[in-house]
Amino acid sequence: MNDKLLLTINNIADIRVDKFLTEQLPQYTRSYIQKQIELGLLLINGKVAPARTRIKTGDTIEFTIAPPREVDITPSEIKLDIIYEDSDILIVNKPKNMVVHPSAGHYNDTLVNALLFYAKDSLSGINGEIRPGIVHRIDKDTTGLLMVAKNDHSHVFLSDLLKDHNIERKYNALVYGNIKEDFFTIDRPIARNPKDRKKMAIVENGRRAVTECRVLERFGNATHIELSLQTGRTHQIRVHLTSIGHPLLGDPLYGRSKHLFNLQTQMLHARVLGFIHPSSQQFMRFESVLPTEFLHTIGRLQML
């Protein structure tokens, strides 16, 4: 059965309708509500309206949450590196070359396929049938820690932490060139690249993106750095580092055409996750070791 909201606005002026609906329906994330709106399921004063519409007193809203479509996503018996698990969350250490959720060209052997086999029905459904339990993503070639929600309460709670930038996320990266500053912040807006829709770019009217950087070790022609995300834009780290002339070693999309040591994958690892637990309200912090290929590359750089 569909969830449906029908009401007349009172004492509200100049607020985006997607924000308003998120407040009215806290069991759903804002991104999920926006996807429902894109399906034409929002009527304002009897007319289909986009998510950016600003509402005012007297407006009539009719909004429907469609039931999830049945999609044939096959559970796959793929070994998972589970760092932590309880009744609310899973912390997974994702290997390289694993896509997080099914998409065009990647319907099998994703993290979601593996989670469906491992956790059965114990995953949140807020993000729909394609992304059960998935609160956030990392790229296919990025290794490291991911949060997975096992129920809708946990999903909403963790999504709100992400939205409010209240989750500690630290990455380790190897980049081209010798970075001179010990500490620096990259604060540059990111949006879809207008010349290449497969890529993101620094765009003046894009969404604000902030990455804090700390140098860990210099090798002359490369640098090992730690990055702390203050925002979570698509390809944020990769775009930011490329924009300052220090792309990731091995980055197939934003890096160089010929890579040092002929690397076939980008040197980026999601090493730290820290957040308030959705039920216990206690702060939890998880850390994963650098993968073998990352450590091997550091060893080769130290020998140059």
Image (spheres, grey):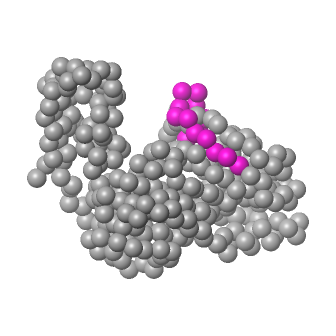
Looking at the image, which residue sits at the far left?
Answer: 1
| Residue that appears at 42% across and 69% down | 90
Q: Is residue 40 magenta?
A: no
Compared across the picture, whether 219 is left or right of 124 comes to right
| Residue that appears at 88% across and 70% down | 303
| Residue that appears at 55% across and 61% down | 273
User: What range of the chain is rendered magenta?
Assistant: 199-213
Residue 281 place in picture, x, y as percent: 43, 60
Compared across the picture, whether 261 is left or right of 78 comes to right
Q: Is residue 209 magenta?
A: yes
Residue 295 place in picture, x, y as percent: 73, 71
Residue 19 place in picture, x, y as percent: 33, 35
Q: Is residue 70 above or below residue 54?
A: below
How many numbered dots are placed on residues in this image? Answer: 0
In the picture, which quadrant includes the C terminus? Answer: bottom right
Q: Is residue 199 visible?
A: no
